[in-house]
Amino acid sequence: MQNDILVYGSYGFTGNLTVDEFQRRGLSVTLAGRNEDKLKQQSEKTGLPYLVFELNTPELTTIIISPFKTVLNCAGPFRYTSLRLAKACVNSSINYLNVTGEFAVIEQLSLLDKKAQQNGCVVLPGAGFDVAPSDCLIAFAQNKFPGARTIRLCLSLGGRPSRGTMRTSLSQFKEGGVIRSRGLLTPVRIAHKSYKIDFRDKVRTCVSIPWGDISSAFYSTQIPNIEVYMAMPNRFARLAKLAGLFHGIVKRKPFSSFLASWVERQPEGPSLSEREKGGSRIYVTVNDITSRKSFLLKTPEAYTLTAQIAADAAIRVTADTVKPGFHTPSTAFGMNYIMKFKGVERHELVRGKRNRL
Ligand SMILES: NC(=O)c1ccc[n+]([C@@H]2O[C@H](COP(=O)([O-])OP(=O)(O)OC[C@H]3O[C@@H](n4cnc5c(N)ncnc54)[C@H](OP(=O)(O)O)[C@@H]3O)[C@@H](O)[C@H]2O)c1
């Protein structure tokens, strides 16, 4: 499997951590992206080969990516990078993975299912903290409650987002909120609802966000109603509500330019010590008309876990262990996949108590 995997966007914050994780596992990968200087630097540091190319290069399939079995895309926002690279991969029977949490990207990639099946390759978005842990937890919750019709997912990141994540969230924010209702993606106001959720270490305010699970969880479970919430400090929750109410104004310049330039001044991502100390919690409730069940997943810090999942998923797919076609993490590897990562704990929540599962 040495050098069967190409990592595009390898010198970004997440790409870098993922390349480190491949090396920790003793595997050589090929670095790639559009900035030669950054690739050269990364190649000198890691001793790995690299390829420089833009995604609008005409020879993308025939020459550049054809020697590889798998392409792992870490270059986001994925709305600008994913479809072109994924199509090139599928046309050349190469597996394609990314670490997106953007629901619109997951939707686009689901349309490549048939072609991927015909060409014998795998398309797997969401191979990171978004959406692998929540996707596995939701599949597990459905297994425990097969009649569930509604999913409410609440994420507590427990640490600082990277600059790339903020950039991506900002580009999604401009488009407003979305939930899945009766099987359909349905626009709503940004932060249209909020809840106080007891994550069992702390009660946190969670505000609705348009996240990848409104697509991935639907493809994993066919449950028709899905809402996703993010825990945030009360003052940010209030700001998010205001931004939702005045979305028409807030998404326009100069406000959006001010936010974009603020994002570019933020640190690249959480430091090593922040990542070592951090941890995330994912709370999911599934219900039908009369009853409900709730589950909690505790995980290591989101960016550390993303790098581990992305590398692990790419290795598994490259080893031909997954049936060709479009997948979510739980359809590719099963609902218990997330439990193989160190530091992950799963609990069923029963009237204020926790039962470890
Ligand atoms: N699934 C998860 O849990 C998870 C976890 C971490 C990150 N993410 C997502 O991953 C993405 C990257 O995050 P990050 O923190 O690594 O950001 P980052 O440090 O800003 O890195 C972004 C990388 O993408 C490349 N890139 C961006 N736009 C490109 C384009 N149009 N064409 C070619 N390359 C492009 C950048 O290259 P240049 O420097 O040349 O622009 C850079 O290598 C974000 O969308 C983030 O939301 C998801």
Image (cartoon, helix red, strand yellow):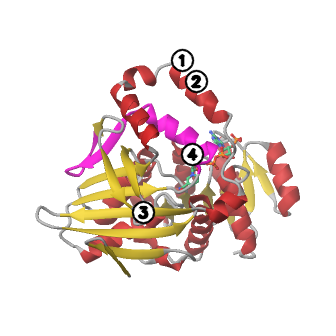
The image shows residue 35 at horizontal and vertical percentages of 77, 42
Whether the residues at callouts 1 and 2 have beta carbons within 8 Å, the answer is yes
Helix, strand, or loop for circle 2? helix
> As shown in the figure, which amino acid type bears the numbered disc 1?
Pro
Q: Earlier in the sequence, mark 4 or mark 1?
A: 4
Instruction: From the image, tell me which residue sits under label 4.
Output: 165
183 magenta-colored: yes
Question: Of residues 256 and 329, which is closer to you in this image?
Answer: 256
Instruction: From the image, tell me which residue sits under label 1.
Output: 254
Against 261, is 90 above or below? Answer: below
> As shown in the figure, which amino acid type bears the numbered disc 4?
Thr
Helix, strand, or loop for circle 1? loop
Helix, strand, or loop for circle 4? helix
Marks 1 and 2, how far apart in space? 6 Å
The image shows residue 14 at horizontal and vertical percentages of 65, 54
- What residue range appears in magenta? 160-186
> As shown in the figure, which amino acid type bears the numbered disc 3?
Ile
Label 4 residue near ligand 1, CB within 8 Å: yes
Instruction: From the image, tell me which residue sits under label 2.
Output: 258
Helix, strand, or loop for circle 3? strand
Q: Earlier in the sequence, mark 4 or mark 2?
A: 4
Q: Earlier in the sequence, mark 4 or mark 3?
A: 4
Marks 2 and 3, how far apart in space? 31 Å
Instruction: From the image, tell me which residue sits under label 3.
Output: 282
> Can residue 148 be seen here?
yes
| The C terminus lies in quadrant | bottom left
